[in-house]
Amino acid sequence: MLGMNRVLDVDTLVPTAPLDPGTVVDGSPEAGSRALAAVAGVEVGVWQMTPGTATDVEVDEVFVVLSGSGTVSFDDGERVDLGPGSVVRLRAGEHTTWVVRETIRKIYVA
């Protein structure tokens, strides 16, 4: 069970692993996440991805970028620049391409 702390630790290392080679477009990005809390049936956690480009199929999620920079592009042509403070809504089933220039660390609610 997750701890009952009021202040959630977003600074502790997030373990990462290489992404599935079938999703990597450029570089050797790694990604990983760490759950922080469960709130009203949803998970709140920290996710990070190291530099590189990869594709993904999303889940329902809202996230806030804590650090890093990059872009996320959607199949409908929309492109969102990511940096500290960016708040983005992802919808289940969306196909995205993540281009990470500087390791992105985000808080997600999914």
Image: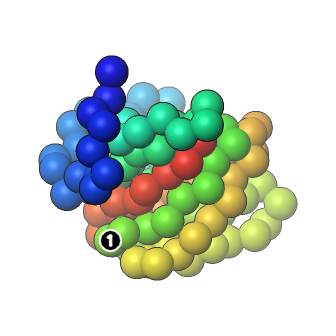
Q: Residue at point 67% right, 71% down? A: 79
- Rendering colour mode: rainbow
- Regarding residue 55, the answer to whether it shows in the image is no
Residue 34 vs residue 29, the one in the foreground = 34
- The N terminus - image quarter: top left
Residue at mark 1: 67
- Regarding residue 105, the answer to whether it shows in the image is yes
Q: How far across and how far down the image is residue 95, in percent?
A: 71, 45
The outermost residue toward the right is 76
- The C terminus - image quarter: top right
Q: Secondary structure at mark 1?
A: strand
Q: Residue at point 62% right, 65% down? A: 88
The 10 Å Cα crowd at callout 1, few under 14, some 14 to 19, many 20 or more, is some
Q: Residue at point 47% right, 44% down? A: 44
Q: How far across and how far down the image is residue 41, in percent?
A: 61, 31
Q: How far across and how far down the image is residue 38, in percent?
A: 48, 35
**Residue 75 in the image: above or below residue 17:** below
**Residue 107 in the image: above or below residue 102:** above
Q: Residue at point 69% right, 43% down? A: 60
Q: What's the residue type where badge 1 is placed?
A: Ser
Residue 98 vs residue 14, the one in the foreground = 14
Q: How far across and how far down the image is residue 33, in percent?
A: 35, 39
Left or right of 84, for residue 40 = right
Left or right of 99, for residue 34 = left
**Residue 44 in the image: above or below residue 22:** below
